[in-house]
């Protein structure tokens, strides 16, 4: 049984703590946060768990693995400190605030032979796994483009923009579902609320994949409706994945058939297909629980995680290129692989 320590008890840390506490393969042993009131709440929920305001107390203990669920600016130093203390590490997304920091975490994990995993929770979402399977099966035909929307009112972040906060989900989903790395990315956005800080709260990204697929991603903290939706358009069929809907995935037998010979305008008669949406059966498993269990499996079996440190590094490379584009008027930026 792996002993787990969690650093950070803000929004996401308590959810991770709950899952590791509930899983039979792990023991939630330590929780660290700078705020005493949060630690007192943890003690009420889990009386047997040790708490501290100093993460070094946790690293000096016999925990097997450390979960870093702090603001992104702390990911790099905390992950390195945990690795150098001999701990396996699960870092929330994004793995780090820059490519250089991410590379250092990955390199240190490999040097010390420790598991490094990134909390790309949607890679453990059964609906995303199903979408990947359908795309890979060829049922949709050749993929033309993908449109992704991730918007809500809040939560505004004081230290990172919406690209670094929300887009890691969609970049990781796209790389996972397509099994490809984009060549280029472009990004445009707006600064509506935190104007003095210059923090973008809405952004539009386009990822250009080597097989010709275009993926558009819209992310926003300033929207009246919570939307988590993907549209995948193929030459044969179309797919809609809506993470909020009861039917998570619908397959539409819709499309356009082009006649083989259409030399003149008179001969050019497109044929449209208007099939209904058919629900695709998706089993329910809490994605975060599946993620935590996978981390424990990787520790026990010493295998590379699905959302490994190297996958997290890829995501940060896309984000960093998108940030350059955002500050450069939306110019297409090459992604250095």
Image: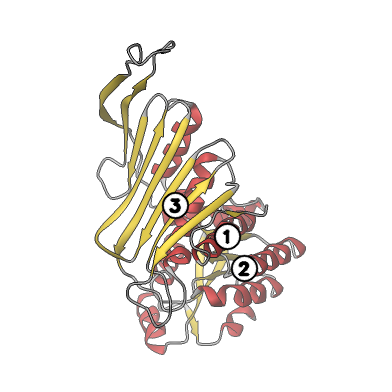
Percent from the top left, x then y, of residue 79?
Answer: 62, 72
Residue hosting label 3: 122
| Label at residue 321 | 1
Percent from the top left, x then y, of residue 95?
Answer: 57, 65
- Locate residue 233 relative to residue 225 in the image: left or right: right
Kind of element beneath mark 1: helix
Q: Residues within 10 Å of mark 1 (few under 14, many from 20)?
A: many
Residue 280 seen in render: yes
- Locate residue 14 relative to residue 117 in the image: left or right: left
Earlier residue among tags 1 and 2: 2
In percent of the image, x 47 and y 76: which residue is there? 8
Residue 319 or residue 70, whichever sits in front:
319
The Cα–Cα distance between marks 2 and 3, rounded to whole angstroms, is 25 Å
Quadrant of image for the N terminus: bottom right
In percent of the image, x 65 and y 50: which residue is there? 303
Earlier residue among tags 3 and 1: 3
In percent of the image, x 66 and y 77: which residue is there? 81
Kind of element beneath mark 3: helix
Percent from the top left, x then y, of residue 136?
Answer: 50, 31
Residue hosting label 2: 64
């Amino acid at each position: 049984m792996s002993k787990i320590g969690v650093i950070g008890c803000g929004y996401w840390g308590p959810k991770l703590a709950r899952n590791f506490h509930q899983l039979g393969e792990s023991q939630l042993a330590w929780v660290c946060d700078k705020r005493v009131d949060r630690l007192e709440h943890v003690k009420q929920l889990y009386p047997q768990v040790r708490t501290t305001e100093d993460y070094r107390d946790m690293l000096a203990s016999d925990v097997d693995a450390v979960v870093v669920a702090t603001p992104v600016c702390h990911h790099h130093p905390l992950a390195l400190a945990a690795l150098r203390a001999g701990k396996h590490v699960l870092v929330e997304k994004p793995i780090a605030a820059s490519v250089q920091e991410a590379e250092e975490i990955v390199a240190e994990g490999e040097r010390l032979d420790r598991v490094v995993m990134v909390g790309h929770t949607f890679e453990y979402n059964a609906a995303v796994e199903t979408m990947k399977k359908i795309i890979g099966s060829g049922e949709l035909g050749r993929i033309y483009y993908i449109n992704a929307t991730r918007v809500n009112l809040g939560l505004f972040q004081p230290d990172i923009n919406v690209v670094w906060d929300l887009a890691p989900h969609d970049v990781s989903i796209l790389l996972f579902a397509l099994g490809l790395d984009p060549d280029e990315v472009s990004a445009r956005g707006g600064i509506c609320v935190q104007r003095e800080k210059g923090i973008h709260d809405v952004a539009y990204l386009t990822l250009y994949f080597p097989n010709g697929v275009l993926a558009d991603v819209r992310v926003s903290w300033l929207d009246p409706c919570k939307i988590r939706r993907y549209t995948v358009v193929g030459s044969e069929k179309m797919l809609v994945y809506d993470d909020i809907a009861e039917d998570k995935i619908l397959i539409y037998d819709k499309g356009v058939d082009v006649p083989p010979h259409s030399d003149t305008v008179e001969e050019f008669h497109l044929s449209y297909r208007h099939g209904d949406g058919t629900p695709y059966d998706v089993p329910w498993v809490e994605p975060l629980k599946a993620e935590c269990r996978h981390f424990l499996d990787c520790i026990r079996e010493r295998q590379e995680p699905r959302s490994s440190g190297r996958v997290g590094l890829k995501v940060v490379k896309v984000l960093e290129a998108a940030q350059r584009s955002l500050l450069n008027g939306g110019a297409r930026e090459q992604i250095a692989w």
